[in-house]
Image (spheres, helix red, strand yellow):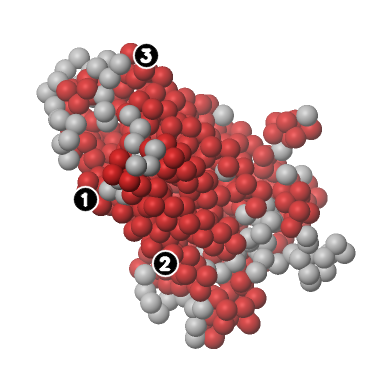
Amino acid sequence: MEKLKSYFVDKKQQVVVFSSTAIALYGYDQGMMSLINTNQDYLKTMGIAEEDPQVGVIVSVYYLGCAVGAVIFSYLADKYGRKPALFGCLATASLGNLIMFVSGLGYSQGALTVMYLGRIVMGLGVGGVDSVVPVYSSELASDDSRGKALAQEFQSNIFGLNMAFAINLALTVSLGKTNEWAWRIPIIAMQIYPVGLLAIFERLPESPRWFIFHERHDDAAASLKYIMGEEEGKKKLDELQENAKQESGKSIGYSDMFNPKHPMFHPTLITIMGQVNQALTGYGAVSVYGPQIFELLGYDVQLSEFLTQGNFISYFILMTFAWLLVDAVGRRTVLLGGSGALVTCFLLLTLFGGLAQKSGELGIPRQAVAIPGIVSLFLATGAFGIGWLATIWLIPTEIFPTTARAQGTAVSVIIWGLANFAVTLLTPILFNNLAYWLFLVFAITNTFAGVWTYFYQPETGGRTFEENQEFFDEARKEGSWRVGRVREGEFRKLPYPKPDGEEGETQPLLARVRDQM
C-alpha cells in the first residue's frame, strides 16, 4: 500500500509512470500493424494485394519517420526543454494516428497516400518519444536506479505491444478479416496513450539538469525542491552547478560526434554499435513475423496467432527480471547473458525447425519437435527482453555529457530506425529463401554481438554521469577502446559499496536483487 501511495506523492515515481506510458505507445504500434496487414478490407481500401511489397513498406516507412523525429525533437529538447519537446512528440504521434484512422474512410482514391502520410507523421512523434523520454527519465532518476526506471518503462512497451495485438486478435476473431472496423478500431485505440499523457502533462517537473545548463538556476532550484524537497534539493543543486562548471563551454554538435578526432566519437560509436547489435539479435524479425515462425513449426494460421499472443504475454512477464537485474548485476552482464541465451535458443530453433519441416520423411511426430521449438522461441523472447531491449536505450543516456545527451540518444533512435527499416523489409525475403536456416544466421549474429560487447562495452551502471565520462578520458590516454585495458579493467564490473558505505567488495547477488524490489 505504501508503494502505491508513493506513486501519487513521489515526483520521481510519477516521472517513471509517465515515461512508462509514453514508451508503451511505441510498443503499441509494434503490435498494431501485424494483423492489420492481413485484413482483407484494409488491403482493398489501400488498393494493394497481401503479397504486394508495399505492405512491408507501409510498416517500415514509420521507422524512417522515427529517425527524422529523433533529430527534430532532440534539438527541441535541448533548446526549449525536455517537457516542451515531449509535448510536441505526443501531439505529433496523436495527429499521425488520426491521419492513419481516416485513410480511406468514406473514400478510396488517395487512401494509400494518406496512410503513408499518417505512418510518417506518427513515426516522427514516436521517434521523438524514443529519443527524449530516456533522457528525461535518466536525468531525474537516482544514479543507482536509472536502469530499473528505464527497464520498467520498457516493460510497459511490451504491455503496449500486448494490448495492440490482443485488440487486433479479438476483433479479427469476432468480426473477421474482411471487416473494416477490425483494422480501424486498433488504430484509433492508440489515442488513449498520447491523449491521456497530455491530460496529466502539467504535473511533471522539468529536468533540473536542463535548467542548470541553460543558466536558469532559480528554476533548477524550484524544480529540485518540487522533486526532492528543500534540503535534498539544495544539496543536489550544488552538485549539478559544480558539474555544469566542468562542462561549460563544451557545445557539441552532430558533426563533432561523428568526427573520429573528437572525444564524443567514442561514445557515439558505442551507441551506434549497441543498436546495430540489438538489430543483429534478430528479435525485430521475431516480434513482427512471430505468426509466420509458428507456422514454420507446423501450426495453422489462427493457432499461430494465438501462440504469438502467448509469446508476448510471456515476454511481458519475463521483463520483470530486466529491472530486477540491470542495476543489481550491471549492463554488461545482462547483455552478455542475453546474447548467450539467444545463441543457444536460435541454434535449437534451427534444429527443431529443420526437424519440423522433415518430420514426415523422418517419421518423427510433428509435435515432438514443434513443442520444444515453441519453448525455445519463448525463451529467446525473454532473453532478448531481459538482456537487450531496455539496456541499449539506457546506455546512451549514461555515457554522454549533458550538452550531448539528447543528441546521443537521437543517434541511438536514428540507428534503431534504420536497422528496423532494413529488418522489416528483409525478413520476408530471408524467410522465403532460407526458411529455418534463418535461425542459424541469427545464432551467428548474436555471437558477434556478444563478442563485441565483451571487448568494447563499458559497465555504466552504479556510476554518475560524470564518472562514466572518466572511462572515455582514460581510454584516450591508454590509446585503446578495449574495456579490459582501461584502468586495469575497472569498467568491466559494477561498483558496489560495502555495508559501511566504503568502496569494496560487491554485495551478495540476492541482496542486490532484493534492494531493487
For mark 2, give the secondary structure: helix
Residue at figure coordinates x 23%, y 31% from the top left: 115
CB contact under 8 Å: marks 1 and 3:
no
Q: Nearer the viewer, residue 514 or 250?
A: 514
Residue at figure coordinates x 42%, y 36% from the top left: 367
Determine which residue is flagged by label 1: 433
Q: Which image quarter: residue 298? A: top left
Q: Which image quarter: residue 307? A: top left
How far apart are the alpha carbons under marks 3 and 2? Answer: 44 Å
* Mark toward the start of the polypeptide (2 vs 1): 1
For mark 1, give the secondary structure: helix
* Mark toward the start of the polypeptide (3 vs 2): 3
Identified by mark 3, the residue type is Ser
Residue at figure coordinates x 48%, y 65% from the top left: 450
The correct choice, above or below, for 198 with respect to 346 in the image is above
State the image coordinates of residue 31 (x, y, percent, origin top left): 40, 34
The label shown at residue 448 is 2
The correct choice, above or below, for 512 with respect to 287 in the image is below
